[in-house]
Image: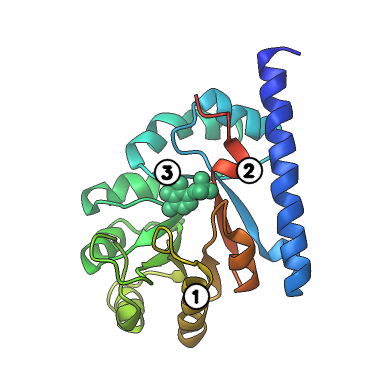
Amino acid sequence: MSGSDEMAARFLAQRRSVLARLRRAAGQAGRAVDDITLIAVSKTLSPASIRVALRAGHRVFAENRVQEAQAKWPALKRDFPDAQVHLIGALQSNKARAAMAIFDAIHSLDRPKLAQALADEMADQAPDLFIQVNTGSEAQKSGVLLADVPDFIALCRDTYGLPVSGLMCLPPKGAVAAPHFALLAQIAADCGLKKLSMGMSDDFEQAIFQGATHIRIGRALFENARA
Ligand SMILES: *Cc1c(COP(=O)(O)O)cnc(C)c1O
């Protein structure tokens, strides 16, 4: 096999294994597989490695830096027009315009200044917006504190006219993740939001049990592929 055939075979095997885990967890939770979007986290991957995944049929990806996405995705989207790329990393408000132009969803809406900047750049085709919630109340982590979520949703919607569709969280490193997922699901339900971006390679089954609609998977799909 050539190097690129090997890369394709490895990606397909890892994707099959992640999808099998996803199906098993959805089955145990009594949920429909189609209600869960598998986002392939392609941060730090080369365009060549991402193309392997695109050619294998994967379509939903995520990056954590605006500049990296700007460098990689215009060409990838030209060749695969139905591909989507989501932003899962911090967004500076002076990059709101660039982010609106390239991302199909933003999972890191976390403060009034950013809400205003995004509102100023709103176009007909707005990305899907997720509010990032700091479920562990960690001082160094971005995200809205749990107690502030209802007011922040109201600010985004009523003051800025932003169509918020869900919540996102990143549990503290080393913590048991399930309680954080449960908190996020509860506050989303209280606020009438349907989408939940939660769960990564090591804990996405727990997230699916708690209602995740978007799981963000890097290592389990791309181990050995990062060039
Ligand atoms: C990198 C990253 C992921 C993917 O994590 P893995 O453990 O590699 O699956 C998910 N979410 C965010 C916000 C990330 O930065």
User: Is residue 169 toward the left or the right of residue 110 in the image?
Assistant: right
**Residues at marks 3 and 2 touching, judged by CB atoms closer than 8 Å:** no
Residue 150 picture quarter = bottom left
Viewer-nearest of discs 1 and 3: 1
Task: Identify the residue at horizontal 54%, vertical 60% (top origin).
Answer: 199
Image location (x, y in percent) of residue 16 = 75, 43
- Hey, what amino acid is under mark 1? Pro
Give the mark, 1 or 2, whose residue is nearer the N terminus.
Answer: 2
Q: Dot 3 corresponds to which residue?
A: 102
The image's colouring method is: rainbow
- Residue 53 visible? The answer is yes
Viewer-nearest of discs 1 and 2: 1
Task: Identify the residue at horizontal 26%, vertical 47% (top origin).
Answer: 95
What secondary structure is marked by label 1? helix
Which mark, residue 59?
Answer: 2
User: Is residue 97 toward the left or the right of residue 43 in the image?
Assistant: left
Mark 1 surroundings: few (<14), some (14-19) or many (≥20) residues within 10 A:
some
Q: CA distance from mark 1 to mark 3?
A: 33 Å
**Residue that sits furthest to the top in the current view:** 2
Q: CA distance from mark 3 to mark 2?
A: 15 Å
Of residues 155 and 200, the one drawn nearer to the viewer in this rendering: 200
- Residue 104 visible? The answer is no
Compared to 41, does 109 lie above or below? Answer: below
Task: Identify the residue at horizontal 53%, vertical 71% (top origin).
Answer: 178
Q: Dot 1 corresponds to which residue?
A: 179
Mark 2 surroundings: few (<14), some (14-19) or many (≥20) residues within 10 A:
some
Compared to 112, does 80 lie above or below? Answer: above
- Hey, what amino acid is under mark 2? Arg
